[in-house]
């Protein structure tokens, strides 16, 4: 499904990735593990098209991603949940979930919202609340829902459990676990896999922007 080979990325002249490689098989869950600053977020942002690689190749379902813009990659069914959630504070919960769907030419907003509210019924109850009024954990749920709304083939989850209270952390884990065995592949970036080690089928360790042998 996803194959990244020998990825090099520099951010403002600082080398962030130096030959990182990973694979995510169709329908599998894979962990990308490393300490803070190791390059996990950079890798996810590069896959998503927010950062450009200076070397290496990224293919998704046999298609070369490096030639596509970020919105074109999302249109392939790739959903991204950033570590900082990236919600629009003034928009409602439902509007935040809909943001990527508004620009989709293939996905039907009504059908995707129905799916999201079936998986995360608690969000339906707060759909009219502005994102700025939610707790950090609730915002994580909305960020996950937004990624799932467009991520029909692949989900990129950056530290989904970071800074979340235990109860909401378990809820997030349950939702992610519910994707196990589905047609959606998942790449989870974490400092450790305490919350998801039982879920992942494989893991890649990264240190200073490279694979840790």
Image: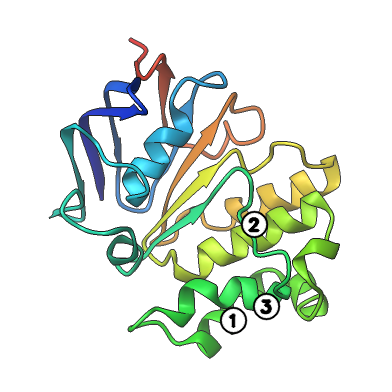
Residue depth check, mark 1 versus mark 2: number of the one nearer the observer: 1
Residue 31 visible (yes or no): no
Q: Position of residue 14 (x, y in %)?
A: 36, 20
Image position of 42 (left or right of 59): right
Residue 21 visible (yes or no): yes
Marked residue nearer the N-terminal end (3 or 2): 3
Snapshot colouring: rainbow
Count of numbered badges drawn on the protein? 3
Q: Which residue does the numbered mark 1 point to in the structure image?
A: 113
Image position of 87 (left or right of 77): right
Q: Position of residue 49 (x, y in %)?
A: 32, 50
Residue depth check, mark 1 versus mark 3: number of the one nearer the observer: 3
Q: Quadrant of the C terminus?
A: top left
Q: Position of residue 172 (x, y in %)?
A: 69, 51
User: What SS does tag 2 mark?
Assistant: helix
How far, Cα to Cα, is label 3 from label 2? 18 Å
Residue depth check, mark 3 versus mark 2: number of the one nearer the observer: 3
Residue 39 found in image quarter? top left
Q: Which residue does the numbered mark 2 point to in the structure image?
A: 175
In the rendered structure, are the residues bearing label 1 and label 2 in contact, judged by CB atoms less than 8 Å apart? no
User: What SS does tag 3 mark?
Assistant: helix
Instruction: Name above or below for residue 117 compared with residue 79.
Output: below
Q: Which residue does the numbered mark 3 point to in the structure image?
A: 94
Q: Position of residue 30 (x, y in %)?
A: 43, 38
Within 10 angstroms of label 1, few (less than 14), some, or many (20 or more) residues?
many
How far, Cα to Cα, is label 1 from label 3? 8 Å
How far, Cα to Cα, is label 1 from label 2? 16 Å
Residue at (85% x, 47% y) in the render: 167
Marked residue nearer the N-terminal end (1 or 2): 1
In the rendered structure, are the residues bearing label 3 and label 2 in contact, judged by CB atoms less than 8 Å apart? no
Marked residue nearer the N-terminal end (1 or 3): 3
Within 10 angstroms of label 2, few (less than 14), some, or many (20 or more) residues?
some
């Amino acid at each position: 499904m996803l194959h990244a080979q020998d990825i090099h990325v520099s951010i403002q002249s600082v080398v962030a990735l130096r030959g990182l490689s990973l694979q995510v098989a169709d329908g599998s869950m894979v962990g990308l593990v490393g300490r803070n600053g190791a390059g996990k977020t950079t890798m996810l942002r590069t896959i998503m098209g927010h950062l450009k690689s200076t070397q290496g190749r990224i293919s998704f379902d046999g298609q070369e991603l490096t030639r596509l813009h970020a919105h074109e990659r999302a249109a392939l069914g790739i959903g991204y949940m950033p570590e900082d959630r990236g919600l629009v504070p003034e928009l409602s919960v439902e509007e935040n979930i809909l943001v990527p769907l508004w620009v989709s030419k293939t996905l039907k907003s009504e059908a995707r919202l129905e799916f999201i509210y079936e998986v995360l019924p608690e969000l339906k109850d707060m759909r009219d609340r502005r994102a700025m009024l939610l707790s950090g954990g609730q915002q994580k749920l909305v960020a996950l829902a937004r990624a799932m709304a467009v991520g029909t083939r692949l989900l990129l989850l950056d530290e989904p459990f970071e800074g979340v209270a235990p109860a909401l952390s378990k809820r997030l884990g349950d939702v992610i676990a519910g994707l196990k065995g589905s047609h959606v592949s998942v790449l989870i970036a974490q400092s450790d896999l305490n919350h998801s080690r039982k879920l992942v089928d494989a893991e890649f360790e990264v240190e200073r922007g490279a694979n840790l042998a």
